Amino acid sequence: MSHQFVSVVQLLLAATFLIVPIVAYRHGTAAQHAAEAQVESQGYEAELLSRHRIRFAESGAEMLLPFAIAVLMGTLAALNAFDTGIGRILSLVVQPLLLLAGGVVTAGQVFVVRFTESALRKSGDAAVRDLDVKAFIDAAEAAFPSWLRYLIVTRFVLVTMGSAFVVLVLATA
């Protein structure tokens, strides 16, 4: 029974790693333009965002990693659904890695304003000192479907607490 719960968590993770990059690819350019327009309305050049590597669009190449994670999680979900020993072993290796690496990356997506403000402060660029980060992030987010934010938070919870749950269940099984 516990392997079915593990499979569900892994399958949900796979789904989020498929959907989020597709939405970013589809709506990212509009979000980038909205953010740049908002930055310009604050009296800054739109290039300020690209100069600081702030992008909302997802390229085809950038989609490869989340898609690979989705395939991996889907495979693990199938292996664990059939209660295979190899699924358990691979999950005990992969889930902690996903928890650590994925937790950091997805935290940056959940707490995007805080992470962006911190990165800009650390850049030492005096030109961004008074930039209203929340305003241009809000402008970009408005270009995405309203449900995307909930999916990003869900992915963060699944990557962190879901991965910890998977490791706990499989380690004690």
Image (cartoon, rainbow, N blue to C red):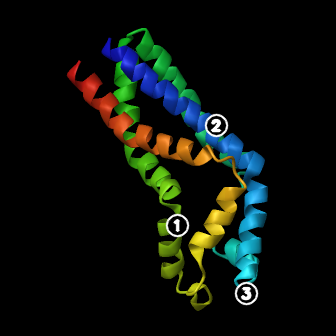
Q: Look at mark 2 in the image and give the residue it sits on.
A: 19
* Residue 55 can be seen in this image: no
Q: Position of residue 106 (x, y in %)?
A: 49, 50
C-alpha span from label 3 to label 2? 35 Å
SS type, badge 1 = helix
Question: Dot 2: within a 10 Å radius of its alpha carbon, few (fewer than 14), some, or many (20 or more) residues?
Answer: some
Which amino acid type is marked by label 2? Answer: Ile
* Residue 102 can be seen in this image: yes
Which amino acid type is marked by label 1? Answer: Val
Q: Nearer the viewer, residue 9 or 140?
A: 140
Which amino acid type is marked by label 3? Answer: Gly
Looking at the image, residue 50 sits to the left or right of residue 164; the answer is right
Q: Look at mark 3 in the image and give the residue it sits on.
A: 43
Q: Residue at x 64, y 47 (%)?
A: 146
Q: Quadrant of the N terminus?
A: top left
SS type, badge 3 = loop
Q: Nearer the viewer, residue 118 or 67?
A: 118
Q: Residue at x 59, y 78 (%)?
A: 132
Q: Position of residue 122 (x, y in %)?
A: 48, 80
Q: Look at mark 1 in the image and give the residue it sits on.
A: 113
Q: Are marks 3 and 1 in contact (CB under 8 Å)?
A: no
Q: Residue most toward the top?
A: 82
